[in-house]
Image (tube, rainbow, N blue to C red):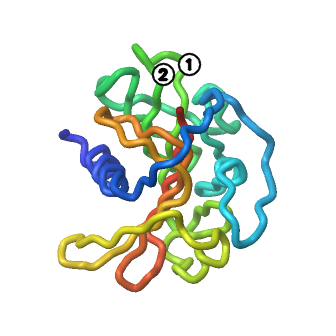
Amino acid sequence: MKNKFLAAVLCFSFLIVPLCSCGKNKNIESEQSIVSSAVMEEGTFDIEAIRTNINIKGHKFTVPQKLSELEEGLKYEFVDEEFDDGLYMVEIFDENGLILKSIATNAHKKSKKAFLYNVSVEDSDSDVAGIVPLVSTKEDVLKQFGAPDDKVSYDDSGEKKEAYKYGVYEPREDFKSKGRFMTIGFNSSDVVEVITVNYSE
């Protein structure tokens, strides 16, 4: 992988694979279904509310979300070539420049049917359901979402870090992350570094 971003995303995805708990295989709705923004009760995790409360640099996102239906004023472009079945790196811009780099699926030959199913938020001018990277703490996360379904500790270049996992993750051998889940990575000071929301079948 020559793309550093892709390598980082995949590394974080594979890191959380061991977090997955077995459970009943839930019937997951179509990846392209969109629900209205839901209100989440404090102290509980609700993926339906989470996926409709993603704010990135002043823009509202929902996953899954068709690239052709992005908020007005946003533009996107595919980066490099298809690296797996229908998967492309995609960059999304507003009038001030790049605001999000992610992976689009259903993008065979850069199809207009492509959509986001996974986004990662890591800037302090963005949030997921009120949790802000580089600002919110582990205590804030526990108050907002309750105890995680699983957690893992790991070493990142000599720094001890931890990640919380909420929801259902389906381990796979290909690149696409499957399941309805959120992961939150913390630095060694228990401050949120990155929040990833995934919603796919």
Q: In the image, what residue occupies the spot 42% across and 40% down?
A: 177
Q: Is residue 150 visible in the rendered structure shown here? A: yes
Amino acid, disc 1: Lys
* Distance between the alpha carbons at the discs numbered 1 and 2: 6 Å
Q: Is residue 83 above or below residue 16?
A: above
Q: Assign a secondary structure to mark 2.
A: loop
Residue 199 place in picture, x, y as percent = 56, 41
67, 85: nearer the viewer = 85
Residue 104 place in picture, x, y as percent = 46, 32
Residue 16 place in picture, x, y as percent = 37, 56
Amino acid, disc 2: Asn
Q: Please give the residue where the numbered disc 2 appears in the rendered image.
A: 106
Quadrant of res 143 = bottom right
Q: Assign a secondary structure to mark 1.
A: loop
Q: Is residue 89 above or below residue 108?
A: below
**Is 122 on the left-hand or right-hand side of 131?**
left
Q: In the image, what residue occupies the spot 39% across and 27% down?
A: 87
Q: Is residue 68 above or below residue 58?
A: above
32, 3: nearer the viewer = 32
Q: Is residue 98 visible in the rendered structure shown here? A: no
**Is 78 on the left-hand or right-hand side of 14?**
right
